[in-house]
Image: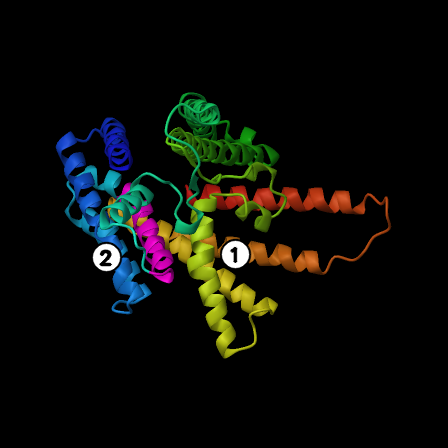
């Protein structure tokens, strides 16, 4: 089942990418064949890491160069974008696979089974951390919850592409025409802020609908294959502060950053200074983790279009600052009498300030 499912799913992804980016199927097929052949080598790389013949940074460099840099350099035209998008997930997954399997004793399973497991994790399972990849819960076949996820994902994608995105473009066009006309004064003051806020909300709605819709499709397809995997988004629209938001938003990438950047850096920092439990030590580790996420996003965008990008790094550094500001403010909150309206007012003001700052950052990043 495994390799056949991999082939069918990769073919489906290739057909969708070809339709979406107007690629010829030959380049798509060659690119994905390259990825599959490359992925088959990572069980051997994991063995080398377990034996101490290669280091973890070297594994990351191999993953990034093989799955991202080489396709960006040699893939023709618009095919580069499709391969870099797939390669982004594959590079992070390959690193996680090598790190986690190298920490366990050498498995006694056959090499073919190990290669099949590696390829399934890299190119079918959307989870990026190997130990969080879920489990095989049932034979492949129709599954009601999986179908519900797929339906929800399709509805979200259709809503984003057919309703929210056109509405966003029309509204932005209207605001632009109004601002450039002789009646630009009508958009002054509060109306200008309302127009900007509306644009930010619509753009964020498009982004969230697209990402959450794709995540629902992936989860639903995995359930049809008999695998239960964790959710990628945990209702981020209900977040009340920056830390709560990042605990809900894109958990696949967030868990990868936390496991392979935040905690290793924090533990290493604690060796040289007793700061692991201090606010300063956590703040430094948090800043490094968010900056790394920003650099990864900007790096992928650069590989896609060969233009320099820096806004993502700045946005993630500011986001780390917002997390720390809210955390400090919560620690310094004074007790209030029971039944007082103060906590409710404070919570709602905090929520409003958080969402205003988040939407402003998102709008600037996608300017």
Left or right, 367 with respect to 52, comes to right
Residue 309 visible, this orientation: no
Q: Quadrant of the N terminus?
A: top left
Q: Residues within 10 Å of mark 1 (few under 14, many from 20)?
A: many
Q: How many labels does the image show?
A: 2
Residue 313: where, in percent of width, then height?
41, 54
> Quarter-wise, where is residue 53 in the image?
bottom left
Q: How crowded is mark 2: few (under 14 residues within 10 Å), some or many (20 or more)?
A: some
Q: Nearest the camera: 300 or 244?
A: 244
Residue 325 visible, this orientation: yes
Q: Write down the residue under mark 2.
A: 44
Name the residue at 35% across, 56% down: 101
Q: Write down the residue under mark 1.
A: 320
For marks 1 and 2, give the CA distance.
37 Å
Q: Nearer the viewer, mark 1 or mark 2?
A: 2
Which residue sits furthest bottom?
272
């Amino acid at each position: 089942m495994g390799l056949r499912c991999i082939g069918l799913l990769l073919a489906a992804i290739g057909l969708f990418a070809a339709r979406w980016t107007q690629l010829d199927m030959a380049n798509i097929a060659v690119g994905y064949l390259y990825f599959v052949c490359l992925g088959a080598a990572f069980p051997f790389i994991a063995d080398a890491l377990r034996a101490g013949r290669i280091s973890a940074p070297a594994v990351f460099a191999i993953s990034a160069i093989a799955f991202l840099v080489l396709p960006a350099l040699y893939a023709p035209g618009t095919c580069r974008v499709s391969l870099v998008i797939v390669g982004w997930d594959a590079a992070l997954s390959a690193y996680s696979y090598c790190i986690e399997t190298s920490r366990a004793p050498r498995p006694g399973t056959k090499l073919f089974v190990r290669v099949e497991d590696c390829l399934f994790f890299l190119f079918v399972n959307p989870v990026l951390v190997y130990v969080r990849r879920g489990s095989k819960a049932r034979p492949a076949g129709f599954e009601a919850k999986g179908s519900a996820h797929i339906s929800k994902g399709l509805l979200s994608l259709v809503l984003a592409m057919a309703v929210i995105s056109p509405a966003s473009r029309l509204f932005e066009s209207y605001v632009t025409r109004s601002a450039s006309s002789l009646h630009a004064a009508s958009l002054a003051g509060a109306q200008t802020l309302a127009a900007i806020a509306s644009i930010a909300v619509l753009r964020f709605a498009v982004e969230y609908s697209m990402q959450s819709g794709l995540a629902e499709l992936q989860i639903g397809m995995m359930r049809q294959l008999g695998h239960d995997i964790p959710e990628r988004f945990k209702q981020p629209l209900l977040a009340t502060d920056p830390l709560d938001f990042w605990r809900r938003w894109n958990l696949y990438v967030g868990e990868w950053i936390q496991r392979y950047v935040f905690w290793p850096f924090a533990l290493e920092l604690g060796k040289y200074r007793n700061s692991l439990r201090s606010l300063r030590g956590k703040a430094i580790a948090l800043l490094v983790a968010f900056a790394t996420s920003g650099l990864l996003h900007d790096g992928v965008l650069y590989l896609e279009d060969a233009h320099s990008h820096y806004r993502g790094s700045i946005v993630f550094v500011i986001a780390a600052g917002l997390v720390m500001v809210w955390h400090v403010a919560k620690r310094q909150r004074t007790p209030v009498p029971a039944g007082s309206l103060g906590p409710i007012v404070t919570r709602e003001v905090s929520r409003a300030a958080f969402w205003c700052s988040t939407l402003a950052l998102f709008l600037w990043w996608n300017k």
